[in-house]
């Protein structure tokens, strides 16, 4: 197949999954055309059958705000014609699904370009709920030939909030490439951060308010009282000052390290003993899966789609949003007992590979593309979804 992929190219789970998917599909013989404003951050310099089309926005004094959505639509239209795309797969509905719809309308009857939209999270639960975006988001989702959601939770949210038919959404969970997260493949950098015998607690995110960065610090402060350890933050974003202020207030500044944005998350996870993810909401929590694939137990909130990834008392523990005490106790129970840590580390890796390995998930996308191209994207009806409800 010839597939166009559009995603946010910067740091973030949706861009990471879109890029890894393109790479995996190219390795399986498909021709992949990334269409975005910058080269996706996880894309290596050259790969056979992988092309990148940079979307440039026109600068003109009249355009006080840039016209990215239009430039993107124009580029999608051009690439569809030149590369003879079978399908355009857009990640994150806003504005990508709208641009794809414009591109398809422009193509008209010349040939039937199919659009698949993958919903990732805040396109449904936050940004798409804004009054000014709601109608256009729903319209663009409904105009897609195929819709996938990265968790059952996100599918339910989409059905409830946007009144989209349940049988028009296919759940395809996020995935990891097991070899990339094989802990044993990396030199251990632990001694660069802390003395022998101490534990390395990690948090990886884009530091947005939804990540509850202050809770990360508060949980760690409680862990540190019982287990000699350091907290390593990977990533950056608007809430970073919150983390530094909280660490100062709790008197643990010297126990907290900020590494900033890093390309090689797999290599860093390979030296972690525990991942903290106390988010207010996560449609999936890709970093939890990445940690599990690296054999890192996870302590997280029981929020959104996280329970579809983290298995309670098997690959980690979960607490309610804001319940730092429970999550800290859970973390200590893992870190202070070797046998528990080894049991969870092994289970985490095993579940990540067996349930969420690229070899398991990517063929689901291939089969779904085939159904969309054949005009048969609707899944069998799932009446139990009518009850809705959260995790
Ligand atoms: O929707 C977002 O907030 C952005 C997006 C991203 O690019 O990181 O995150 C979402 O998509 C990820 C990949 O599917 C999921 O793992 C994250 O849980 C999800 N974020 C939220 O739901 C807050």
Image (spheres, rainbow, N blue to C red):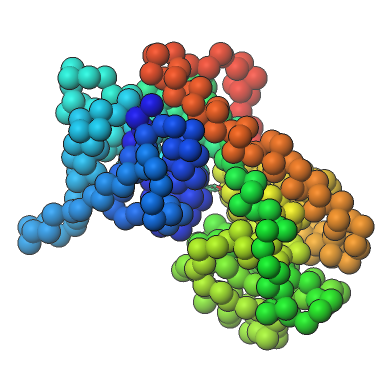
Residue 249 drawn above or below residue 321? below
Q: With 237 as the anchor, is 339 left or right in this view?
A: right
Q: Quadrant of residue 210?
A: bottom right
The C terminus, quarter of image: top right
Residue 97 image offset from top left, x and y in percent: 33, 36
Q: What is the residue that sits farthest to the front in this orientation?
A: 48
Residue 165 drawn above or below residue 318? above
**Residue shown at the point (44%, 37%) measured from the top left:** 26
Residue 262 image offset from top left, x and y in percent: 52, 67
Q: Visible in this render: residue 88?
A: yes
Q: What is the residue that sits farthest to the left in this orientation?
A: 61
The N terminus, quarter of image: top left
Q: With 74 as the anchor, is 158 left or right in this view?
A: right
Q: Nearer the viewer, residue 338 or 332?
A: 338
Q: Visible in this render: residue 132?
A: no
**Residue shown at the point (19%, 50%) measured from the top left:** 67
Number of labelled discs?
Answer: 0
**Residue shown at the point (32%, 25%) measured from the top left:** 86
Residue 307 drawn above or below residue 363? below
Residue 293 drawn above or below residue 106? below
Residue 302 image offset from top left, x and y in percent: 70, 47
**Residue shown at the point (18%, 26%) measured from the top left:** 107
Residue 61 image offset from top left, x and y in percent: 7, 62
Q: Nearer the viewer, residue 194 or 150?
A: 194
């Amino acid at each position: 197949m010839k597939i166009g992929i559009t995603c946010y190219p910067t740091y973030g789970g949706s861009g990471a999954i879109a890029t890894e998917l393109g790479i995996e599909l190219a390795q399986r013989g498909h021709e992949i055309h990334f269409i975005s404003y910058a080269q996706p951050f996880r894309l290596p310099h050259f790969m056979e059958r992988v092309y990148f089309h940079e979307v440039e926005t026109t600068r003109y004094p009249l355009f006080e705000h840039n016209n990215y959505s239009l430039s993107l639509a124009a580029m999608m239209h051009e690439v569809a014609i030149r590369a003879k795309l079978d399908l355009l797969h857009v990640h994150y509905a806003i504005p990508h699904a709208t641009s794809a719809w414009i591109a398809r309308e422009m193509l008209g009857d010349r040939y039937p370009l199919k659009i698949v939209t993958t919903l990732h999270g805040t396109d449904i639960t936050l940004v798409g709920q804004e009054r000014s975006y709601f109608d256009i988001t729903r319209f663009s989702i409904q105009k897609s030939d195929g819709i996938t959601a990265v968790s059952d939770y996100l599918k339910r949210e989409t059905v409830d909030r946007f009144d989209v038919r349940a049988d028009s959404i296919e759940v395809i969970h996020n995935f990891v490439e097991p070899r990339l997260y094989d802990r044993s493949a990396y030199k251990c950098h632990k001694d660069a951060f802390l003395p022998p015998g101490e534990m390395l607690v990690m948090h990886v995110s884009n530091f947005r308010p939804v990540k509850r960065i202050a809770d990360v610090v508060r949980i760690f402060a409680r862990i540190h009282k019982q287990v000699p350890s350091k907290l390593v933050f990977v990533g950056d974003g608007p809430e970073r000052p919150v983390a530094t202020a909280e660490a100062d207030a709790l008197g643990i500044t010297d126990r907290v390290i900020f590494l900033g944005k890093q390309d090689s998350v797999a290599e860093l996870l390979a030296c972690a003993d525990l991942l903290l993810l106390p988010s207010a909401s996560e449609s999936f929590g890709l970093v939890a899966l990445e940690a599990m694939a690296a054999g890192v137990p996870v302590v997280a909130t029981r929020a959104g789609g996280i329970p579809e990834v983290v298995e309670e008392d098997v690959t980690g523990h979960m607490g309610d949003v804001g319940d730092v005490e429970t999550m800290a106790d859970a973390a200590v129970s893992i870190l202070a007992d070797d046998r528990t840590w080894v049991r969870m580390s092994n289970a985490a890796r095993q579940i990540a590979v067996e349930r969420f390995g690229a070899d398991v998930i990517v063929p689901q996308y291939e089969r779904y593309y085939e159904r969309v191209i054949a005009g048969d994207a609707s899944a069998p009806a799932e009446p139990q979804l009518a009850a809705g409800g959260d995790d």
